[in-house]
C-alpha cells in the first residue's frame, strides 16, 4: 500500500531494475496477448508492407551480400525473430545486429537462437549488450543497415529528433525502419499527463548539474511523426490496441501481484504502488479509471479496460 508520509521525489524507473523490468514486461505482454497481436500483424501485413518491398528494391543490389538487420531494444527477441523468419523467406543470407542493454533479456534471446539453431540457418547474429546511445558512439561511421526494427524502445533511447535522424542515417537507401510506439492514448497519455513520473536524475560526468533523464512514455508516435514530417521522411502507418484489464487496481483488497506488475508497466515505475505517495497514487488511479473503457463482466459488475493505441510506422529511405 502507498504510504502517506513516504514520498519518493523520483520513483525508480522500470528499466533501471533489469529483473523487475523483465518480469513486469512479460506479465503485461501475456496479459494483453501481445505475442498474438504482433504475430497476427506480421502474418497479415509484414510481407506486403516490408518483405516484398525490400525484396523488389534490393534484389539486384545485394549480390551475394547478406541483408543487414539492426534490432534496437530487442528484449528476448520473440517479436524480432518473427520478423526475421519472414525476411528469411526472401533473403537467404541475413546478418542481424541486436542491441539490448538488459543482460537477462539478451541471454534469453541468445538461448532461444541456440535452441532453434536449425530454424535460423542463414542468420548470423552480432550481439550488443549495450544501449543504443553506447552503440552509436562505438560503431564505426558509415555502417548501414537495410532493415531496422525499434519496437516500443523509442521511449528509452534519448531525444526523439536525434534518435530518428540517427536511425535514418543508419539506413541504406531503399531500406526500411519498422518503428512501433504508443500514441497519445492510454499509457502514452498517462506519461504526458504525469511527466514527473519515471524521470531519473543523473549527473553527467562533464558537469555537476544534475540532468533529468526521461524514461517514461513521454515520446509517442505523435512526436516521431512530427520529426518524419519535418525531414520529409516517407512512411506508412497502421495501428493496434493494447488493452489491459485494470479492474483489480481500484480495489486494494483485490490488487494481485499480477495487477501490480501491469501498473508498473503502464506507469514505467518499479513497484509503483509502494514507491509513490498516496496523493500521486490516487491521482494516477483516478486518471486510469477516467480513461478506461467500461464493460459489464459476467456477474454484471463493471470491468475497466485501459486501452493504449499503438502506431506501427514503416519508414522508407
Ligand atoms: C518495452 S521493451 C520492448 C521490447 C521488444 N522490442 C518487444 O517489443 O518485445 C523495451 C526494450 O528496450 C530496451 N532498452 C531500454 N533502454 C534502452 C536503450 N537505451 N537502448 C536500447 N534499448 C533499450 C529494454 O531493455 C527493453 O528490452
Image (tube, rainbow, N blue to C red):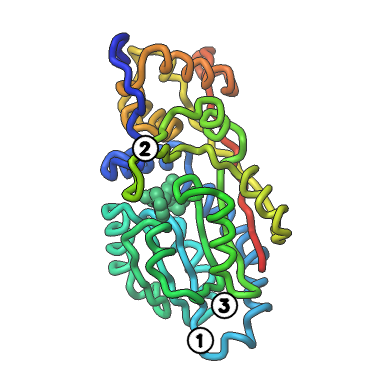
Indicate the secondary structure of the residue bearing disc 1.
loop
From the image, tell me which residue sits under label 1. 65
Quarter of the image containing the N terminus? top left
Q: Looking at the image, which residue sits at the far bottom? A: 63
Q: Is residue 238 left or right of residue 77?
A: right
How busy is the neighbourhood of tag 3: few (under 14 within 10 Å), some, or many (20 plus)? some
Above or below, 233 relative to 56: above
Circle 2 or circle 1, nearest the eye: 2
Are the residues flagged by discs 3 and 2 in contact, CB closer than 8 Å?
Answer: no
From the image, tell me which residue sits under label 2. 210
Above or below, 57 relative to 25: below
Q: Kindly report the distance in space between the C-alpha atoms of the residues bearing marks 2 and 1.
A: 46 Å
Q: Earlier in the sequence, mark 3 or mark 2?
A: 3
Residue at 51% in and 15% down: 286
Residue 20 picture quarter? top left
Q: Kindly report the distance in space between the C-alpha atoms of the residues bearing marks 3 and 2.
A: 49 Å
* Residue in the foreground of this view, choosing between 258 and 70: 70
Q: Kindly report the distance in space between the C-alpha atoms of the residues bearing marks 3 and 1.
A: 13 Å
Above or below, 309 relative to 92: above
How busy is the neighbourhood of tag 1: few (under 14 within 10 Å), some, or many (20 plus)? few
Q: Earlier in the sequence, mark 3 or mark 1?
A: 1
Q: Earlier in the sequence, mark 2 or mark 1?
A: 1
Residue at 29% in and 10% down: 5
From the image, tell me which residue sits under label 3. 90
x and y, in percent, of residue 249 in the image: 42, 19
How busy is the neighbourhood of tag 2: few (under 14 within 10 Å), some, or many (20 plus)? few
x and y, in percent, of residue 107 in the image: 27, 59
Are the residues flagged by discs 3 and 1 in contact, CB closer than 8 Å?
Answer: no
* Residue in the foreground of this view, choosing between 86 and 160: 160
x and y, in percent, of residue 101 in the image: 33, 55
Amino acid at each position: 500500500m502507498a504510504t502517506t508520509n513516504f514520498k519518493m521525489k523520483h520513483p525508480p524507473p522500470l528499466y533501471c531494475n533489469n529483473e523487475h523490468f523483465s518480469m513486469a514486461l512479460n506479465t503485461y505482454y501475456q496479459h494483453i496477448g501481445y505475442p498474438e497481436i504482433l504475430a497476427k500483424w506480421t502474418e497479415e501485413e509484414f510481407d506486403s508492407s516490408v518483405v516484398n518491398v525490400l525484396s523488389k528494391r534490393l534484389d539486384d543490389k545485394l549480390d551475394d551480400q547478406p541483408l543487414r538487420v539492426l534490432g534496437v531494444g530487442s528484449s528476448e527477441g520473440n517479436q524480432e525473430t518473427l520478423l526475421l523468419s519472414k525476411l528469411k523467406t526472401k533473403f537467404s543470407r541475413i546478418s542481424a545486429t541486436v542491441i539490448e542493454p538488459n543482460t537477462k533479456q539478451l541471454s534469453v534471446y541468445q538461448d532461444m537462437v541456440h535452441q532453434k539453431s536449425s530454424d535460423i540457418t542463414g542468420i548470423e547474429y552480432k550481439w550488443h549488450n549495450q544501449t543504443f546511445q553506447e552503440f552509436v558512439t562505438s560503431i564505426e561511421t558509415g555502417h548501414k543497415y537495410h532493415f531496422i526494427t525499434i519496437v516500443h524502445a523509442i521511449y528509452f533511447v534519448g531525444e526523439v529528433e536525434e534518435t530518428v535522424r540517427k536511425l535514418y542515417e543508419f539506413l541504406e537507401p531503399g531500406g526500411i525502419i519498422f518503428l512501433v510506439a504508443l500514441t497519445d492514448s492510454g499509457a502514452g497519455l498517462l506519461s504526458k499527463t504525469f511527466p514527473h513520473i519515471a524521470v531519473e536524475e543523473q549527473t553527467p560526468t562533464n558537469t555537476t548539474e544534475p540532468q533529468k533523464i526521461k524514461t517514461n512514455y513521454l515520446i509517442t508516435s505523435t512526436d516521431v511523426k512530427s520529426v518524419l514530417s519535418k525531414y520529409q521522411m516517407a512512411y506508412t502507418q497502421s495501428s493496434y490496441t493494447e488493452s489491459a484489464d485494470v479492474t483489480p487496481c481500484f480495489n486494494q483488497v483485490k490488487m494481485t501481484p499480477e495487477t501490480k506488475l501491469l501498473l508498473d508497466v503502464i506507469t514505467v515505475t518499479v513497484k509503483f504502488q509502494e514507491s509513490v505517495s498516496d496523493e500521486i497514487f490516487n491521482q494516477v488511479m483516478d486518471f486510469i479509471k477516467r480513461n478506461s473503457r467500461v464493460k459489464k463482466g459476467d456477474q454484471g459488475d463493471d470491468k475497466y479496460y485501459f486501452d493504449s493505441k499503438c502506431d506501427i510506422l514503416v519508414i522508407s529511405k
